[in-house]
Image: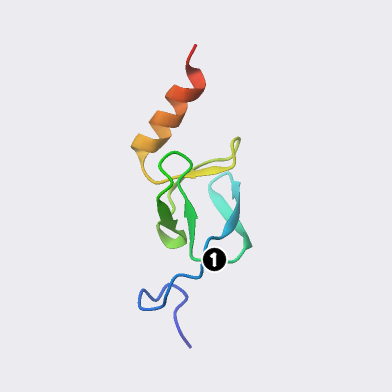
Amino acid sequence: MLNRFDRSLPPNGEAEVKYLDGDFRVVRPGGFVRCAVTGVPIALDELKYWSVDLQEAYASPEAVLERHKELTKG
């Protein structure tokens, strides 16, 4: 049986994810999601940052801060 996070396997395409408090649920299987700020792919096993309210993922703390600044302008 293969490990689902085996890096030798090709990516499965983009997943659809429901972001929850402290966890996420995969709605449509895939190997990655895209950062809402930068557009870079984030492997599901490396996903650490997301917004439950906005239902979007972020690649880094800097991307989270950038989104926060965008939303609080004004």
Residue at 53% x, 47% y is 22
Quadrant of residue 28 in the image?
bottom right
| Above or below for 59 versus 12 | above
Q: Around disc 1, counting alpha carbons within 10 Å, would you say few (fewer than 14), some (14 to 19), or many (20 or more)? A: some
Give percent across and percent down for residue 15: 56, 60
User: Which image quadrant for residue 64?
Assistant: top left
Looking at numbered disc 1 in the image, what kind of residue is underneath it? Gly
Q: From the viewer's side, name the closer residue of 22 and 71.
A: 71
How did the renderer colour the structure? rainbow
Residue 6's x, y, as percent? Answer: 39, 76
In the displayed structure, 26 sits above or below 49; it is below
Tell me which residue sits at (47%, 51%) in the image. Answer: 34
Residue lying farthest bottom?
1
Q: In which quarter of the image is residue 7?
A: bottom left
Place of residue 56 in the rendered image (x, y in percent of width and height, measured from the top left): 54, 43
Count of labels in the image: 1
Up the image or down, 18 lies above or below 73; here it is: below
Label 1: element kind: loop
Q: Name the side, left or right, on which 65 lies relative to 31.
A: left
Which residue does the numbered mark 1 point to in the structure image?
A: 30
Q: Which residue of the protein is positioned furthest toward the right in this rendering?
A: 27
Q: Is residue 1 left or right of residue 54?
A: left
Q: Is residue 61 above or below residue 45?
A: above
